[in-house]
Amino acid sequence: MNNSFNLTNLEKQLWPGVTKKDLITYLIYVGPTMTNYLLNRPLALLRAPNGIDGESFFQKNVPPFAPEKIQRWEFKHNDRLTQYMLLDSVENLIYLGNLACVEIHSWLSTIDRWANPKEIVIDLDPNPTEDFSTWQHGAYLIYELLLKLKLKSYPKITGKKGVHIMIPIVPKYNFKQLSFFLKAFKELVIGRWPDLFTGELRKEKRQAPIFLDLGQNGLKKTVIAPYSPRFSSDATVAVALNWPEFLSLKSKPKWSVKANNWPPLFTFPSFKQEIPQTWIETS
């Protein structure tokens, strides 16, 4: 692939045994799928120019040295202006790899309807000592409960210890409206399965193995992008799956940037759903 910028330090080790060249090769593989998902979503990047053992930092503003063809979007909130980077091509995804981006996070909304998310995220954060089958079962219970509300979803392995259940929706609700649904849904889940789920923020106070986190559903909040690498010693990646694929897993997968361990590619659903009216705050 021809690029309008120079690739540099390709032999730089970003993870143990994984170079920048390995990262860029992986990004070429996931590029069309990842770019299609991230189109017009503001990004937040975790960069590690000297690898995960060196200094790392989050970056939301486009670097001043970025090529002109990198798409930008300015957003002012609470008197603070941020110039976000947008992703519109595989070439520009490769540019992020060249910047040693070891994680790519994105908004739940796109710039044309920035106040109205096109997805809801339900974050299941299990106790690290918990067996994979426990949080797999927990995810399945939520999947079934959502179906009873006529809401389809798909799971995303985060590449670390949890799973995101993603719910595609029509981008017509603001986050305040959705907060009513999220609060009621959280209470329903914890009330129905108190031995499995908890909403307790303090880890030492939790009495159930899975923390149900809905806090990323908010303006300017970001979630890990599907197929993004992770800041982990194994160079793991976040992966979207369909439910049969997820439920067939026998153990926590460790798909990674490494060439012999790439994940399967997911076809993201085209459906957009409405939240049941009785679950939406209208006042």
Image (cartoon, helix red, strand yellow):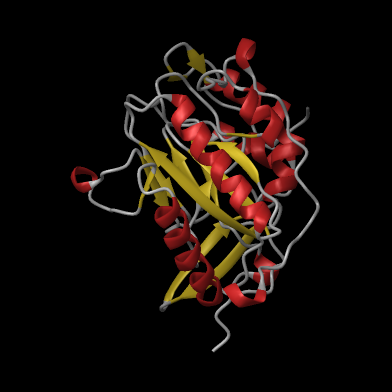
Residue 261 visible: yes
**In front: 46, or 131?**
131
Quadrant of res 3? top right
**In front: 248, or 13?**
248
Q: From the viewer's perspective, is residue 112 above or below residue 133? A: below
Where residue 145 sits in the image (x, y, percent)? 59, 52
Which residue corresponds to the image point at 68% horizontal and 57% vertical from the top-left?
A: 151
Where residue 111 sits in the image (x, y, percent)? 65, 66
Q: Residue furthest right?
A: 270
Where residue 116 sits in the image (x, y, percent)? 62, 70
Which residue corresponds to the image point at 32% horizontal and 26% vertical from the top-left?
A: 129
Which residue corresponds to the image point at 53% horizontal and 31% vertical from the top-left?
A: 229
Residue 101 visible: no
Quadrant of res 50? top left
Where residue 106 sits in the image (x, y, percent)? 56, 51
**In front: 147, or 116?**
147
Which residue corresponds to the image point at 61% horizontal and 46% vertical from the top-left?
A: 143
Q: Is residue 50 left or right of residue 240?
A: left
Q: Quadrant of the C terminus?
A: bottom right
Q: Residue furthest bottom?
A: 283
Q: Quadrant of the N terminus?
A: top right
Q: From the viewer's perspective, is residue 179 above or below residue 231? A: below
Q: Residue furthest front?
A: 192
**In front: 38, or 28?**
38
Q: From the viewer's perspective, is residue 27 above or below residue 217? A: above
Q: Is residue 64 left or right of residue 32?
A: left
How many marks are shown on the rendered structure? 0
